[in-house]
Image (cartoon, rainbow, N blue to C red):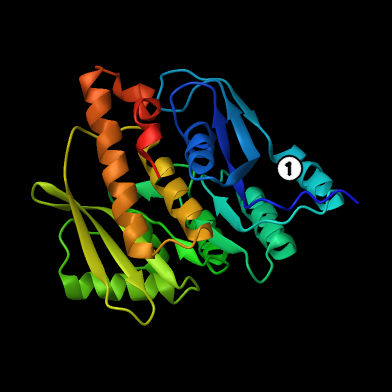
């Protein structure tokens, strides 16, 4: 029988946007650059991402289970499972079942709980949807929420300014759901953007980078892709978070130099060769 499992693989569950550089379009090349095979499961197909005024969208939900069934038939096995934006309770249930079916003793689950930003859930994320996402996080080994999403998961009120003690409490509350490792991203601190790294049993660490430019699509996807591939490759968690933060910063800086519109994401292709 043909063995399809001789190379490290990550199952990537996210949407596909043809233009705008986000989700699978940025994560697949990043994961590949880090010498891990990337196997996407689309949740939706967009002509261009939703940050544009108009877009075409094909919901892939009704196809996902049949798609996954073929992978079972091929006896595919994964070193990592990485999830991104999920648009419905049905999709979250499908992903939860996928993790149950495909997670083995050496499979790492990385969940990016894409639910909101700037202190508010996205319009599609009702309280019920947030509860479903919390259940999905229970399966995770690593979770990469931004500050808003961490507050939603921890059921704590959002605010802009946090002490180290408060961040520890927030990270511990997220970790208590299941994941051993938590990185809370995008914490504003004067001229810096901070990521709070938490691992059970270790001293937490705040990693700072100087803020450059403004928010762009796809940067969170790139960040999580690096964390996922590095985890599969056995890279130390704090080292990986620092690496991901610096790479995203360089992507933004290069995009500013090239005068790339904000909607068009980051010109990561220009510096992808530097990612090792």
Residue 85 picture location, percent across and down: 51, 44
Q: Quadrant of the C terminus?
A: top left
Most extreme residue toward the right is 1
Residue 206 placement (x, y as % from top left) = 21, 64
150 to the left or right of 56: left
* Residue at left offset 26%, top offset 45%: 246
Q: Residue at x 17, y 36 (%)?
A: 212
| Quarter-of-image position of residue 159 | bottom left
Q: Can you see residue 112?
A: no
Q: Which residue is nearer to you in this view: 2 or 103?
A: 2
Q: Residues within 10 Å of mark 1 (few under 14, many from 20)?
A: some
Q: Considering only vertical position in the picture, is 78 above or below 88?
A: below
Question: Which residue corresponds to the image point at 29% horizontal and 19% vertical from the top-left?
Answer: 260
Q: Is residue 244 left or right of residue 249?
A: right
Looking at the rendered structure, the number of numbered marks drawn on it comes to: 1
Q: Quadrant of residue 147?
A: bottom left
Q: Is residue 240 visible?
A: yes
Q: Nearer the viewer, residue 63 or 36?
A: 36
Q: Is residue 68 left or right of residue 219?
A: right
Q: Nearer the viewer, residue 135 or 212?
A: 212
Question: How far across and down, in percent of the image, does residue 203 sit?
Answer: 27, 77
Pinpoint residue 21: horizontal percent, then vertical percent.
Answer: 44, 28
Q: Secondary structure at mark 1?
A: helix
From this view, report whether residue 6 is shown above or below residue 20.
below
Task: Check disc 1 and report the residue beneath it.
Answer: 64
């Amino acid at each position: 029988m043909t063995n399809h499992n001789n190379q490290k693989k990550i199952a990537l569950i996210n949407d596909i946007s043809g233009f705008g550089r986000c989700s699978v379009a940025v994560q697949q090349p990043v994961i590949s650059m880090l010498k891990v095979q990337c196997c996407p499961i689309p949740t939706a197909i967009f002509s261009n991402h939703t940050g544009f005024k108009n877009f075409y969208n094909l919901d892939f939900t009704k196809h996902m289970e049949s798609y996954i069934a073929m992978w079972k038939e091929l006896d595919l096995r994964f070193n990592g499972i990485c999830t991104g934006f999920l648009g419905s309770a049905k999709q979250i249930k499908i992903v939860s079942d996928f993790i149950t079916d495909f997670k083995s003793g050496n499979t790492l689950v990385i969940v990016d709980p894409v639910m909101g930003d700037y202190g508010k859930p996205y319009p599609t994320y009702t309280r019920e949807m947030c509860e479903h996402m919390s259940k999905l996080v229970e399966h995770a080994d690593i979770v990469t929420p931004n500050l808003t999403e961490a507050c939603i998961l921890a059921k704590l009120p959002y605010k802009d300014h946090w002490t180290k003690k408060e961040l520890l409490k927030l990270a511990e509350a997220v970790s208590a759901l299941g994941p051993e490792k938590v990185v809370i991203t995008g914490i504003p601190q004067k001229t810096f953007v901070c990521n709070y790294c938490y691992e059970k049993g270790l001293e937490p660490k705040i990693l700072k980078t100087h803020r450059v430019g403004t928010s762009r699509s796809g940067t969170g996807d790139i960040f999580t892709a690096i964390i996922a591939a590095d985890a599969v490759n056995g890279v130390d968690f704090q080292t990986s978070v620092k690496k991901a933060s610096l790479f995203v910063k360089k992507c933004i800086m290069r995009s500013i130099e090239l005068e790339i519109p904000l909607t068009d994401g980051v010109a990561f292709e220009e510096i992808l060769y530097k990612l090792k």
